[in-house]
Amino acid sequence: MNLLASILRTVVPLVVGWVVTVTGAIGIEVDSTAVAGGVTAAVTAVYYLLLRLTEQAAERLQWEPLRLVAGVLLGWARPPKYKQPPPAGTVQVHLDAEAFGQDLHEIIRRNIRLGGSR
């Protein structure tokens, strides 16, 4: 999922930027410069995709030098990590007394706030 998210976060802005450029912000005039921009966006997307796939394969193979080179060619040595939000209604409780007290206080505060807004 991280690979798909990172690809979409790179390719979608490229495509949107190109479409806005080509359509002249809906004046819709297309010239060779606009087409060149589309080619640039496509080449960039392919470059990014190949390096991300290489980076992910190197990580699976535990081939650190290749992963590092692919990461550097992408502009950052480590691939992005996107945290998944916890499911709705999830409560994280710590087992030490001080943290548990803080967690309990937060749960009570949230319930009071929710109950008061109904």
Image (spheres, grey):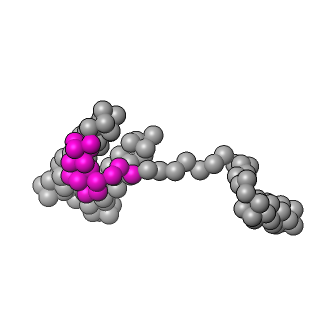
Residue 13 pos. (x, y %): 34, 56
Residue visible at 30% across and 32% down in the picture: 61
Image height of 22 relative to 56, above or below:
below
Question: Quick one: which residue is furthest to the top in this view?
Answer: 61
Q: Is residue 11 visible?
A: yes
Indicate the quadrant where residue 20 lies: bottom left
Residue visible at 38% across and 42% down in the picture: 3
* Residue 66 is a magenta residue: yes
Query: Which quadrant, please, contains the N terminus?
Result: top left
Which residue range is magenta in the image? 64-80
Indicate the quadrant where residue 30 lies: bottom left
Q: Relative to the observer, which residue lies in front, 22 or 108?
A: 108
In the displayed structure, does residue 91 sit left or right of residue 37?
right
Residue visible at 22% across and 42% down in the picture: 66
Question: Quick one: which residue is furthest to the left in this view?
Answer: 32
Residue 2 pos. (x, y %): 43, 44
Residue 100 pos. (x, y %): 76, 59
Image height of 37 relative to 7, above or below:
below
Image height of 116 relative to 37, above or below:
below
Q: How many marks?
A: 0
Q: Relative to the observer, which residue lies in front, 111 or 16?
A: 111
Indicate the quadrant where residue 103 lies: bottom right
Query: Which quadrant, please, contains the C terminus?
Result: bottom right
Residue 101 pos. (x, y %): 79, 63
Question: Quick one: which residue is furthest to the front in this view?
Answer: 96
Q: Is residue 103 visible?
A: no
* Residue 18 is a magenta residue: no
